[in-house]
Image (cartoon, rainbow, N blue to C red):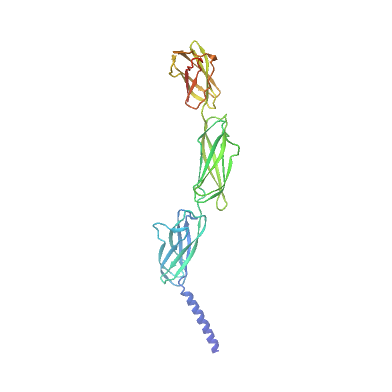
Amino acid sequence: MKRMLLLILFILFSTSHAFAATYVDSAAINVDIISQEPNPARPGESAELALSVQNIGNENLKNIVVTAQPDYPFSQLDGESLTRTISYLNARQDDAATVKLKLKVASDVPAGTYELDIVTTDSTGTTKTTTLDIEVRGKEYSQIVKISKSSIDFATEEQLDFLVTNTGSSSLKNMQLSWMDTTGTILPVYSDNTMYISSLAANESVTVTYIVMADVNANPGLYQLDITLKLEDYNSNFSKISTTVGLFVGGGTNFDVAFSDNSDGDISFSIANVGNNEAYSVKVSIPKQDLYSVSGSSSSIVGNLEKGDYTIASFTVSQEGPGVIPNSTGGEQDNKGAVGLISGVIPAYKASKMKPVAALRYE
């Protein structure tokens, strides 16, 4: 019987000793993340962590110091302390204290999950390290699309370059670039309207080239290109960016200017619009020049000329030196040019080598 009592006392003593050992475990501080801004953290930016600090032990604690010990890709932010102090934490409380810490994230860090150590020290001198997992992910959705031209001509093969720039902080992959003019005026040739980019690193650009043509029967003007950029993010989820640019279709106006007739000092020009655009306010002039003079007005306003149309402009011209005013058999001179001034040379008698000059202006 006595032995039985001794055995029971020994068991009770051992149990109470173990319970006391558990009770004096003052290092039972639990640290967890409440929130993170932004979430995920962004390379090259700051990240603010809200931490929950809870005393799950059996002793009340004072002056609990919470310190972040950052390692790459995290570092201390200028002007921000890595340490926070909690004055008091009751034991076995459901409520927890909240502390906030700000850290800087390296700009060159790849997307991934990285560890951050949080060290807590209480008034008893007990230290505990808690490792938190922080997700870092770059901005995948910031791109710039530019085109190399603001205008193209009708019925002419034109190279149109699209510059795609990844201004985010993470690489992109499996990108698909396409565009469309809903009127059908501007179309790609030699390829369809879709190109693919396998990958594009952060802060890098790539040029995608198309050969395009504009319908010769279309009206000149500003046309809208609808651009679509599809890309794949780090989770293999596709997203789409839609934008628009303007492209003017028109180009220059070309003319043929030819000597038409000579009768009693009156000479005539045939003015033909051989370009793809209508010419407005066409004016034909004979500028001042040696050996030739104009009687009456030296300019003739012929108005508008649609493409493929022509008109006649006549002037009274006298010669003041050697040579003769050419007749209609003297030949013709074609003159093609861009918007502005076009000079049409009228061949004179071959022995003279003197040529009156006509000037053509239009808008």
**Can you see residue 185?**
no
Camera-nearest residue between 110 and 228 = 110
Give the left or right position of residue 48, taking residue 181 as reference. left
Residue 95 in the image: above or below residue 187: below
Relative image position of residue 220 (x, y in whole percent): 53, 30
Q: Nearer the viewer, residue 310 or 36?
A: 310
Number of marks in the rendered image: 0
Q: Nearer the viewer, residue 269 or 151?
A: 269
Quadrant (top left/top right/bottom left/bottom right) for the N terminus: bottom right
Q: In this view, which residue lies farthest toward the top?
A: 264
Q: Estimate the x, y position of residue 82 in percent, counting from the top left.
A: 42, 61
Q: Identify the residue shown where x is 54% and y is 89%.
A: 2
Location of residue 271 in the rendering, given as x and y in whole percent from the top left corner: 52, 20
Q: Residue at x 58, y 42 (%)?
A: 195
- 120 w.r.t. 223: above or below: below
> In the picture shown, does residue 14 fall above or below 171?
below
Question: Is residue 223 visible to the viewer in this orientation of the structure?
Answer: yes
Check the image and name the residue furthest to the bottom. Answer: 2
Q: Position of residue 162 (x, y in %)?
A: 53, 41
Of residues 101 and 358, the one nearer the viewer is 358
Q: Compared to 190, does 350 lie above or below?
A: above
